């Protein structure tokens, strides 16, 4: 995964979500920051997204 758009499409594929503007004002307790330049394996990025998604109660 090398682009923001790829990450967004993967998030949307999980269902029950939609793309919103950055929410800098929200609680950041469970936030991840990932530089999408290919240095982090795609499966790790997907795992982190799934774990974060699971924390939302979806």
Image (cartoon, rainbow, N blue to C red):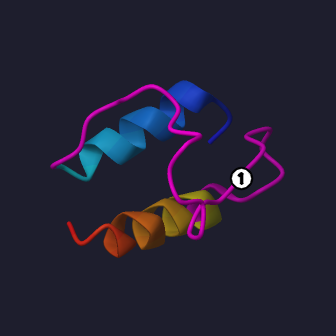
Residue 55 versus residue 38 in the image, above or below: below
Residue drawn at (62%, 42%) of the image: 1
- In this view, the residue farthest toward the left is 16
Name above or below for residue 41 compared with residue 20: below
Q: In the image, residue 43 lies at what x, y percent?
A: 57, 63
The stretch drawn in magenta includes residue 18: yes
Point out the stretch of residues depicted in magenta: 16-43
Q: Which residue is mark 1?
A: 33
Q: Position of residue 48 (x, y in %)?
A: 55, 66
Instruction: Specify few, some or many for label 1: CA neighbours under 10 Å numbering under 14, 14-19, or 20 or more.
Output: few
User: Which image quadrant is residue 41 in?
Assistant: bottom right
Q: Is residue 44 rendered to the left or right of residue 58?
A: right
Q: Which one is in front, 11 or 1?
A: 11
Q: Viewed as shown, does residue 19 lie left or right of 3?
A: left
Q: Position of residue 35 (x, y in %)?
A: 78, 44
Toward the viewer: 58 or 23? 23
């Amino acid at each position: 995964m090398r682009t923001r758009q790829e990450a967004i499409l993967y998030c949307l594929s999980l269902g029950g979500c939609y793309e919103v503007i950055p929410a800098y004002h929200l609680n950041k307790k469970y936030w991840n920051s990932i530089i999408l330049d290919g240095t982090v394996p795609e499966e790790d990025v997907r795992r982190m997204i799934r774990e974060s998604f699971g924390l939302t109660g979806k």
